[in-house]
Amino acid sequence: MTTLFIADLHLSDHEPAITAGFLAFLQREAVHADALYILGDLFEFWIGDDDPNELHDTVAQALAELHDKGVPCYFIHGNRDFLIGKDFAKRSKMTLLPEEHIIDVYGQNILIMHGDTLCIDDPDYLRFRRYIRNSMIQKIFLSLPLCLRQRIAGKLRRQSTRSNRAKSSLMMDVNPLAVIKALKDHKVIHMIHGHTHRPAIHDMTIGGRLSQRAVLGAWHDHGSVLRVDPDAKIELVSFPL
């Protein structure tokens, strides 16, 4: 048995192959796992649980079926789908977790997160993040008509794309000091996150102790999953969609 971690699928109506690959992954591999953790950006964008999108229904049903087969699913919000709420979680039968969370995986304490808060070299993004994560701002946004929310989300995605093109590769990656601080603050030596789309397993020495940071890959032409087994073996695997 294994515990599985994925992130950054960015599911949308425009990428049916990724959706098909994800559904196949649930049926082929996740169904045999002890648990599935989704560390954010499952969807390309999310404008509210009341969005009557057929894709959302399909994914919710697939995750609920996974739960019914004995595999729990846990979710941490990403920077694209941070508005996923209790209604969708209930339909999916998945458990919403806080943005930084410690889990026990076969006796190892592991810090899991989406990873965007580690990118402290991008102050403009962090300011924007604080703004859109404000509960009052979110309440106002979710009260708007669905069509208006769709237009606003589309505009923000286009602005984000233009902004990211102008940013350096270093700025869009995690800051090593932020990683060390997070590990020390949570008193752990293992971390798993997504967001940067740079899959790798990094070994570090912090305070004389060997630490490890695993970065999940994005789903584009290939799927990406991190497997952790009861013998503490960590394996990052890519597979065609």
Image (cartoon, rainbow, N blue to C red):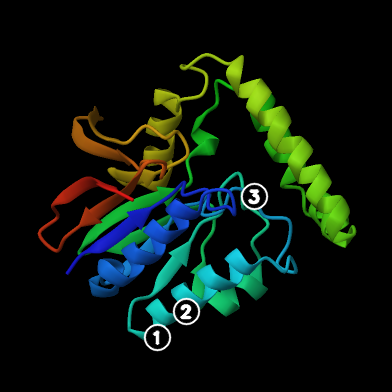
Question: Mark 3 or mark 2, which is nearer the start of the sequence?
Answer: 3
Residue type at the position of mark 2: Ala
Q: In the figure, residue 56 lies in which quadrant?
A: bottom right
Dot 1 and dot 2 residues touching (CB under 8 Å): yes
User: In the rendered view, does 193 fall on the left or right side of 53?
Assistant: left
Residue type at numbered disc 1: Asp
Disc 2 secondary structure class: helix
Instruction: Name the residue rendered at 45%, 24% in the picture.
Output: 175
Residue behind mark 1:
68
Mark closest to the chain's N terminus, 3 or 1: 3
Residue 131 x, y percent position in the rendering: 77, 39
Q: Real-space Cα distance between discs 2 and 3? A: 21 Å
The amino acid on which the numbered mark 3 sits, given as a three-letter code, is Phe
Task: Say few, some or many: other residues with alpha carbon within 10 Å of mark 1 (under 14 / 14 to 19 / 20 or more).
Answer: few
Dividing the picture into quadrants, the one containing residue 62 is bottom left
For this view, does 141 lie left or right of residue 46? Answer: right
- Secondary structure beneath dot 1 equals helix
Residue of label 2: 64
The residue wearing badge 3 is 45
Could you tell me which residue is drawn at 67 percent across and 55 percent down? 46
For image coordinates 46% across by 16% down, the residue present is 170
User: How dense is the environment of label 2, judged by Cα within 10 Å: few (below 14), some, or many (20 and up)?
Assistant: many
Viewer-closest of 205 and 240: 240
Q: Which quadrant would residue 212 be assigned to in this image? A: top left
Position of the N terminus, as image quadrant, is bottom left
Task: Report the Cα–Cα distance between label 1 and label 2.
Answer: 6 Å
- Locate residue 4, reporting x and y percent: 29, 60
